Amino acid sequence: MAETKRLSQLAERLRAFPARPGTKIMEVCGTHTVAIRRFGVQRLLPGTVKLVSGPGCPVCVTPDSFIDEAVALARQGVVIASFGDMLRVPGSRSALEKERAAGSDIRAVYSPLDALKIAVDTGRETVFLAVGFETTAPAIAAAAMKAIEKGINNFSLLTALRLVPPALQALIAGDIRLSGFLLPGHVSAIIGRQAYDFLAGYKLPGVISGFTAEDIISSLLLLLEMHSKGIYKIMNNYPRVVRDTGNDKSRAILSEVFAATDAEWRGLGTIPGSGLELKPAFAALDARCRFTIKADSASPRRGCRCGDVLRGLIDPPACPLFNKSCRPDSPLGPCMVSSEGSCSAWVTYG
């Protein structure tokens, strides 16, 4: 009962907050996007405040070229192991789901260690699609270390790992004007609060939030209060999970296996230092070195504005394909494919 009363009070405070006209807050994380729509938080905002989605859905920001590479490998007879959402993401000419229906050995897994087990059990060349942010990268790094340690020579990674802070810097330097960031809880548990200190140099506040309705509403209130007072700092509103320096063990594993590299993001282009590549000691696990990959490519699909959604330039309904030719049951863009995609969340929760 006390929790319900507190939530109600927070909601009323948010509704009544005297925010500046034109205030625009970006929720970076795809899980936040889904939670906001599911809880109806967007309906509590004062009329002067707008929430926009950011590039925090790993499936969504992965470019077509990566899917094209995975399809090319599958056609070579390689076993492809991937997190489930990636199977439905369309590439330039095909999707992994279609290749599986045509006979390729493509398997959905819950962990990179599952992919490692497939390699051991089958004895066949097995490639894991290493997609995600700082949250999933440590587990992928640990699987790479285990493969080397155990001498598993038929396992490799096709990497499309991305780093959040460089993407935020690219957004700030781009064509969107923001008032602050609702920062991701899961990513921040790895990299820590201090990873966002650079935002102060751009006069932008940020709040790291958890995923309950109370977490999100209280975090938005903290953001609006800082914005209204001209305070530019990073607040950790998720201290039960996030520390200032993050998870030291996870960061050490990442540093041992991966190095930062320039990387392509859907909608944002190539961002310096925003990806992770295997270090030379782990080059034997790099699928791009292990195989000759000749991927078919094509022009981007016409009409899809997933990239603009990921940059916070438009809401999903502004895309001409939204919930028409592009629907959850027949997605044309990754923002509709992923359960964390903005388009999917708008259709599912209204």
Image (cartoon, rainbow, N blue to C red):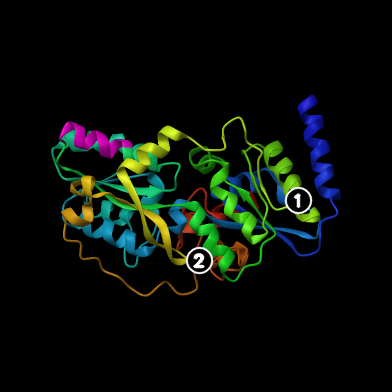
Three-letter residue code for mark 1: Met
Q: Say left or right for 7 vs 209.
A: right
First-in-chain label (2 vs 1): 1
Three-letter residue code for mark 2: Gly
Q: Say left or right for 294 vs 339.
A: left
What numbered label is drawn on residue 307? 2
Q: Which residue is mark 1?
A: 226
Where is residue 271, by image quadrant? bottom left
Q: Residue 2 magenta-drawn?
A: no
The image position of residue 325, as x and y in percent, is 50, 66
Of the 4 image quadrants, the one containing the N terminus is top right
**Residue at the spot x=84%, y=43% of the render?**
12
- Residue range corresponding to the magenta coloring: 142-151
Q: Main secondary structure of the magenta part?
A: helix
The image position of residue 238, as x and y in percent, is 63, 36
The image position of residue 300, as x and y in percent, is 40, 72
Question: Considering only vertical position in the picture, is 337 above or below 253?
Answer: below
